[in-house]
Image (cartoon, grey):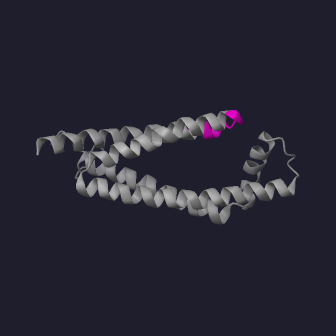
Amino acid sequence: MSRYQCPIAGRCNLRKCIVGWLYAVAVGHAIGAVIMTVGADAVGLVPYHQQILASFGFASADQNALEFQRWWMALFGATLQAFSLSLLVLIYIGDRYRNPAIWGGLALVILWWVPQDILISLQRNAWLHVWVDIFAAIVLVVPLVWLWNLDRKLVQEQ
C-alpha cells in the first residue's frame, strides 16, 4: 500500500482522489451557477432575496427591489459559470502537467477572494455567506496546497 493510498477508494491514489474532488467542486459550481442564472426568480428563493433586501433597508414588498435582486443573482450566476469553467480548465492543466504553479495560483485566488467576501458579507450581517466562504476556503485551499507541495517535490526530483 503506497504512502498516498486513497482512504475512501481502494484503487486510486490520494492525488487522483484530490483532483477528482476539485473536479467535483468545479462541476458543482458550474451547475449551481446555471441554476442561479435561470432560477434566480424561483419562488423558493423569495425568503433569501427578502433577507438580502432587508439588510439594505428595503421593504419585503418592494417589487422593484426584488426584481433588481433577482437580476443581480442571475448576473452573478453567469459570472460564476465563467469562473467554474476557468477552474475546470486550470484543474485539467494542473493535473495533466503536474504544474505546482497552477495549484498555488488557484489557492492564491481563493485566499484573495475569501477575506474580501467575508468582509462584504459581515457589513450586511450575512452570516450564511460568511460560513459558506470559510467552508469553501478550507475544502479548497487545503487540497490545493497539498497538490502544490506534492507536484513541487516531483518537479524538484526530475
Residue at 57 percent across and 58 percent down: it is: 79
Q: Is residue 111 left or right of residue 9?
A: right
Residue reaching furthest left?
158
Q: Is residue 129 left or right of residue 155?
A: right
Residue 35: say if magenta: no
Camera-side residue: 142 or 89? 89
Q: Is residue 27 left or right of residue 75?
A: left
- Quadrant location of residue 67? bottom right
- Quadrant location of residue 80? bottom right
**Magenta segment, principal secondary structure?**
helix
Q: Position of residue 150 (x, y in %)?
A: 23, 41
The total of numbered circles placed on residues is 0
Residue 126: say if magenta: yes
Residue reaching furthest bottom?
38
Camera-side residue: 54 or 9? 54
Q: Position of residue 57 (x, y in %)?
A: 83, 41
Residue at 62 percent across and 40 percent down: it is: 129
- Quadrant location of residue 63? bottom right
Residue at 62 percent across and 56 percent down: it is: 76
Q: Quadrant of the N terminus?
A: top left
Residue at 22 percent across and 52 percent down: it is: 11
Q: Is residue 68 above or below residue 154?
A: below
Q: Position of residue 99 (x, y in %)?
A: 26, 50
- Which span of residues is magenta-colored? 123-131
Q: Position of residue 59 (x, y in %)?
A: 87, 46
Q: Is residue 2 left or right of residue 61?
A: left
